[in-house]
Amino acid sequence: MNLEIEKNIYDAYENAKKLNEKLNNIVTLVDPKSQIDELKDDGLLYGMPIALKDNVNTKGIKTTASSKILDNYIPIYDATIVKKLKAAGAITIAKTSMDELAMGGTNLTAFTGPVYNPYDLNRISGGSSGGSAAIVASGVVRLAIGSDTGDSVRKPASFCGVVGVKPTYGRISRYGIIPYASSLDHVGYFTRNVFDASLALEVLAGRDDNDMTSSYKEVESYSKLLNSNIEGKVIGIISNVIEAISNKNTLDLFESLIKKLEEKGAIIKNIKFDDDLMKAILPTYYMIANCEATANHSNLDGIRFGVRESGNTTEEIMINSRTSGFGSLIKKRFVIGGYGLLQENQEKLFRKAQKVRRLIVEAVKKSFDDIDCLIAPASGNIAPLVSGSDIDELDSEYLVAENHMVIGNFTGYPSMTLPLGFEENCPIGVNITCKAFDEVNMFNIGLAIEESTGLKDLVAKVK
C-alpha cells in the first residue's frame, strides 16, 4: 500500500478518537490494521477511511444500535453493504452513535449519551444518524453510512452542513441492517460533496438476493454521468413548507438559491399539497413506524437476543431485560406500536394510517407529472440546543416544515439534503426529491445547487 494512503487512514483513526472526546459520536473504534493488511490495490474507494452507523452488522465487531439491550451483540456476519465497501477498498475506522434502535431525530437517546454538533457543541447533531453526520462534518472521513426511516440521514445532514443521501427504496440492500420499520427503512449515507455522493452509490447499490426488497434495476455510473446543466428542468417548490417556516434567514437563503437556479435555466413551479395531508404526515408516520418497529424488535427480550437480566420465570426475565435494556423513549414507542397492533385497533389505527400514507403517496406521484424535482428547506432552523426548547408539536411549523421529508420514505423516492447557508455560524440545509430510480437527475440538480451556493467540502472547526 502507498505509505501516504496508510498514513491518511491512521491519521483519520487517531483524529476520530480525539474528536470523540468532544463530539461523543462513536460507539466503537475499529482498528484498521487487519483491513489494511488485506486490502487489494483496486476499487473505487481504495484506501478511503469510512464510518458505519452502529446498526450495520460487522462480523466480530460489537453492533449495539446504541441500545443497552444489545451491548453484548457481536454479529457473526457482515451486512451486504459492508462486503461491498470492503471490496471497493474502504477501511472502516468507527461504528457511530445513533438514536436508540434508530428511533428518534435528535441523537440524544443513545445509551452512550448525546452526540454534539461539530459546529456548536451546545447543539444536537440531529438523528437518528447523528454520529455519522458528525464524523463527516468534522472532517474525519469523507463517507459515513447512515439509515433513513423518516429523515434520519437528511435532517442530520442539514444540521451538520454535509450532503445526506437517501436513495430509492430497494436501491441499496438492507441485509444485515438492524431494522426500524421495514416499509420505510433505507440505507443512506453522508459525504461532503455531490461527486463523492454519486461515487458512493455506485459502490453501495445493486440487487442482493438476501434482501428480497432490493431492486434488479441496473446500477448507473452516477459519477461519470454527473452534469450540472439544469436548463429546462422543472423544479417544484413545496409551498406548504415555505408557508410554514417563520425564520426569515432560512427563507432568504432559499429564495436566493431559487434565483440562482433560475439563472441556470431551471423552470420554477410552486406545488401546493393538501394542508390536511401535510399535517397528517407525522402522525401517520408515528403509527406505521412504531407498529412495524414493535413487530421487528419483539425478539429483543433477553432470551433470544439481548442482555439478559435475572428473573424467576421466563416472563420475569423478559420484563426485567426490557425494563433495564430500553430507554424511556423506546418504551413509549413500543407501547404505541403494541396498541396499534392489537386486533381490535388495527383497522382504526394501523390500517387507517396505511390508507392515509397511500393518499400522500398518490398526491406526490401526481405532482411529478410535470416536474423533475421537489425542493424545500430541509428544516426551518439550525440545529436545536441540546438543552431543548419549547416545541408545539401540533403547530404547522413543526408538523409541516420539520417533517415533510418523510415524503421520501412514504414514496420510496430518492432524496438528498445539501448545505444551503448559515445562521449563527451553524449550517442549514436544502432538500430535493426526485422520481423513483432517478438518482442521476437528483445528483445533477444537487451539483447545480452545490455550484450555486458554493458550499462544498465544508469542515467544522470543533472547539
Image: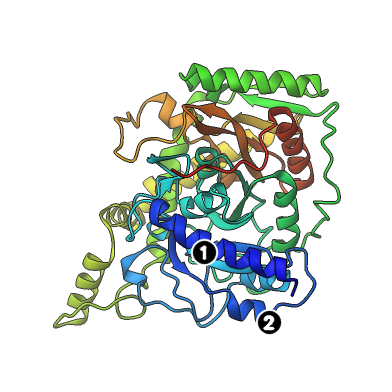
| Residue found farthest to the left | 312
Q: Earlier in the sequence, mark 2 or mark 1?
A: 1
Name the foreground residue: 335 vs 379.
Answer: 379
Left or right of residue 252, residue 67 in this image: left
Residue 347's x, y, as percent? 40, 50
Quickly name the residue at label 2.
38
Give amino acid for label 2. Glu
Q: Is residue 78 visible?
A: yes
Q: Nearer the viewer, mark 2 or mark 1?
A: 1
The disc placed on residue 14 is 1
Q: Are marks 2 and 1 in contact (CB under 8 Å)?
A: no
**C-alpha separation, residue under disc 2 versus residue under disc 1:** 21 Å
Residue at image location 41% in from the left, 68% down from the top? 64
Q: Quadrant of the C terminus?
A: top left
Name the foreground residue: 254 vs 454.
Answer: 454
Residue at image location 40% in from the left, 77% down from the top? 73
